[in-house]
Image (cartoon, rainbow, N blue to C red):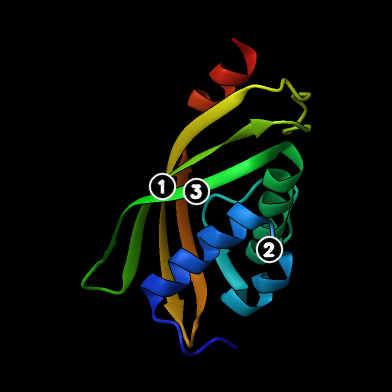
Amino acid sequence: MNTALDPGALAGAVLEVYENGDLSRVDELISPDLVDHNQPAGTESGIDAVRVLVSAVKEGFSETRIEEIFRSLTTDGWVVSQWRMTGVHTGDWFGTPATGRRVSFTGIDLWRAEHGRMVEVRHAEDLFQLQAQLTA
């Protein structure tokens, strides 16, 4: 368990996992009992949803960069993080075959941590923005 990281640093570390695709860090940063209020269909738990999404980003995009635009901690312990992901669509992305196009889209994550790991997340990605770039 990674008790050395505060909730803000944990949120930043999770973004790094999405950027570099390092699935080995998921168990260190995310609680097995993660409550993901927006998990993908077909996943059994929140931590599995994280693994599915990290893998999908790694398989679907190369040259992936995630820039954190804004981060703040709320008074009740939530970390709010707005980010922008850029990359090149070089693999399948949820049924959309590789286009070779450069993409850029944004999202917002709200994370809550306990005992050095994330236990709850709410997130919204601008997938319409992404899909328009892939299919235009």
Query: Which residue is labeled 2 in the image?
Result: 45
Q: Residue at x 48, y 88 (%)?
A: 115
Residue 94 x %, y %: 73, 33
Q: Is residue 41 visible?
A: no
User: Do labels 3 and 1 touch, CB within 8 Å?
Assistant: yes
Pair 3/1: label in front: 3
Q: Which mark is residue 83?
A: 1
Query: Which residue is labeled 3 in the image?
Result: 66
Q: Residue at x 59, y 26 (%)?
A: 102
Sequence-first disc among 2 and 3: 2
Q: Nearer the viewer, residue 101 or 5?
A: 101
Three-letter code for the amino acid on which mark 1 is drawn: Trp
Question: Does dot 1 land on a helix, a strand or a loop?
Answer: strand
Q: Residue at x 49, y 90 (%)?
A: 3
- Count of residue discs: 3
Q: Residue at x 68, y 38 (%)?
A: 61
Pair 2/3: label in front: 3
Q: Nearer the viewer, residue 46 or 130?
A: 130
